[in-house]
Image: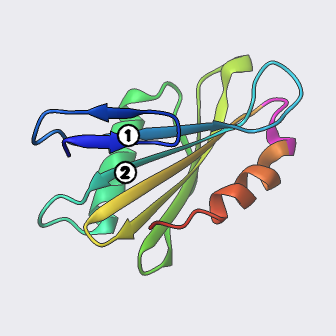
Amino acid sequence: MPSFESPYFQIELPPETVDASSYCFALPAAGRFHPSIVVKFDDLPKGQNLSDYAALQVKKMEAQLKNFKMLVPPQSDAPDQISLSYQWGANDSRFRQYQNFRQYGIRVFIVTGTLLEVGGLQYATMLQGAMRSFRPK
């Protein structure tokens, strides 16, 4: 990946550079916190299927996120897609996240939508609608 071009910039990189891009989108909202959607991607490790990959990511979140609580356990929406939702944090900084894992070839796209648990749930329909529109290319 010696050259990378986005809509906003271009950069020349050394050979064998790995693209570990993340895209973050702040959705419209009133108040101090804006719901967001983050899109990341990863190559599916050899020997793992999408279910294994998602289960490993959930274990990492359980270990790393304070007061983690699963709301909707991982479920397969289609052969190439797994979705789940969970809460984490405390008090005014408690978040609800919706997460979709989507396999496209050997690549896994992780689409995460984030809302405040208190005062942010009215944006859930907008957030989930935007997440459902995601299509790998």
Task: Report if residue 120 lies within the magenta region.
Answer: yes
Q: Depth-wise, is mark 2 or mark 1 nearer the camera?
A: 1
Q: Are marks 2 and 1 in contact (CB under 8 Å)?
A: yes
Is 1 on the left-hand or right-hand side of 96?
left
Q: The residue under label 1 is which amino acid type?
A: Ser
Q: In the rendered image of this protein, does residue 134 appear above or below residue 25? A: below
The quadrant in which residue 118 appears is top right
Q: Residue furthest bottom?
A: 79
Is 65 on the left-hand or right-hand side of 4?
right
Residue at image mark 1 = 21
Residue drawn where x is 87% and y is 43% of the image: 122
Residue drawn where x is 41% and y is 57% of the image: 109
Q: Say few, some or many: other residues with alpha carbon within 10 Å of mark 1 (under 14 / 14 to 19 / 20 or more).
A: few
Could you tell me residue 132's position as x and y percent? 65, 64
Q: In 3D space, how far apart are the residues under numbered discs 2 and 1 (Cα atoms)?
A: 7 Å
Q: In the rendered image of this protein, does residue 118 appear above or below residue 103? A: above
Q: Say few, some or many: other residues with alpha carbon within 10 Å of mark 2 (under 14 / 14 to 19 / 20 or more).
A: some
Secondary structure category for the residue under label 1: loop
Residue at image mark 2 = 41
Q: The residue under label 2 is which amino acid type?
A: Phe
Could you tell me residue 115's position as x and y percent? 71, 37
The quadrant in which residue 106 appears is bottom left
Task: Report if residue 126 lies within the magenta region.
Answer: no
Residue drawn where x is 75% and y is 39% of the image: 27
**Front one among 21 and 43:** 21
The quadrant in which residue 9 appears is top left
Q: Is residue 19 visible?
A: no
What's the magenta region? 118-122
Could you tell me residue 134's position as x and y percent? 58, 62
